[in-house]
Every structure is written in C-alpha cells, then in structure tokens.
Amino acid sequence: MRANGGEPGFGTVPHQFRSEVKVLRAAGIGDWEGLAPLEDARLRQLAAPGQASEARLKRLRAQARLIGDLHLRPEEASLLLHAGIPGAAALGGVDPQRLLNQVHRLQRRLTGPAVPLLAMATLRLWIDRAQSSRSRN
C-alpha cells in the first residue's frame, strides 16, 4: 500500500522495528494494508520463535490501522501513537488544542526546532477523518 504516495511496502522504519518487519515479510505480509487486519493471536504466533517482539508487532499494527483508517503517512501515524493516540476512535474524541500542544512538545523533543511543527489545520483534518470513520463503523 502506498500511503499518500509513499514508498511501497513498509518504507523506512526505525531500526528497532527492523526485525519485526523482516518477520512480517517472511510471513508474506509486505505492507501496512496487510498488517492492519491481523489479530493478536497471529501476531503472537509471528513473535513466538523469538525473532520479533509481540509488543512491537502490535505497535506496528496500530500504526498500520491509523495509516489505513485516516490516510496518514507512516511518520504521521507514528507521531500520533507516540502522543498516546492508539487509533481512530481515540483521535475522534480528543481536544484538538490539547493534542496539538502535546504533539508540538513531542516534535520539538524528537526533531528539534529545525522541522516545522504540525499545523492545527492538519490536526483538525485528521480528527475530522477519525470522526467520519467512526460514524461509518
């Protein structure tokens, strides 16, 4: 799946998730779209041999679901996860200003002042998408 024109497959993932991506690819799961619907039992099965962490696989799945549900880029979904937003339902019910403040603190800590901060308009778009996806389900 190409999230917003991104790279095919999983694209570039942080080094701490490389072994999980390797296990996923070996199991025939080569992109975010293939990862999103996996159940806990399947993730546990993939982690059982010890080459991947079940917790990291679950985190990647949460990222995959945000990417698919809200049409985010992987780095945007990761930012939301780091800010404590585990899925579209949670995003749909947040206070936009509070989340923006939280995300800005996180962005400054992770990237420093060189990278532009997330705009409120972008965050509101994501929240609107989350609310729309919630109403469809």
Image (cartoon, rainbow, N blue to C red):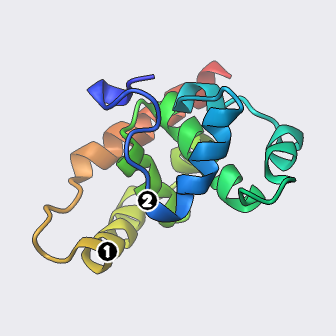
Q: Quadrant of residue 124?
A: top left
In the displayed structure image, the side of residue 50 where residue 104 appears, left or right: left
Q: Quadrant of residue 134?
A: top right
Residue at the farthest left position: 114
The relative height of residue 28 versus residue 47 in the rendered view (above or below) is above
Does residue 85 appear in this view?
Answer: no
Marks counted in the figure total: 2
Q: Residues within 10 Å of mark 1 (few under 14, many from 20)?
A: few
In the displayed structure image, the side of residue 11 where residue 92 appears, left or right: right
Please name the residue that numbered disc 1 is placed on: 110
Return the x and y of residue 62 as percentages of the image width and height.
62, 46
Return the x and y of residue 2 as percentages of the image width and height.
38, 24
Q: Which mark is residue 133?
A: none
Please name the residue that numbered disc 2 is placed on: 14
The residue lying at 48 percent from left, 36 percent from top is 67
Q: Residues within 10 Å of mark 2 (few under 14, many from 20)?
A: few
The residue lying at 29 percent from left, 69 percent from top is 107
Element on which disc 1 rests: helix
In the displayed structure image, the side of residue 74 where residue 25 appears, left or right: right
The CA span between labels 1 and 2 is 13 Å
Does residue 21 appear in this view?
Answer: yes
Image quadrant for the C terminus? top right
Image quadrant for the N terminus? top left
Disc 2 residue type (three-letter): Pro
Disc 1 residue type (three-letter): Leu
Q: Quadrant of residue 104?
A: bottom left
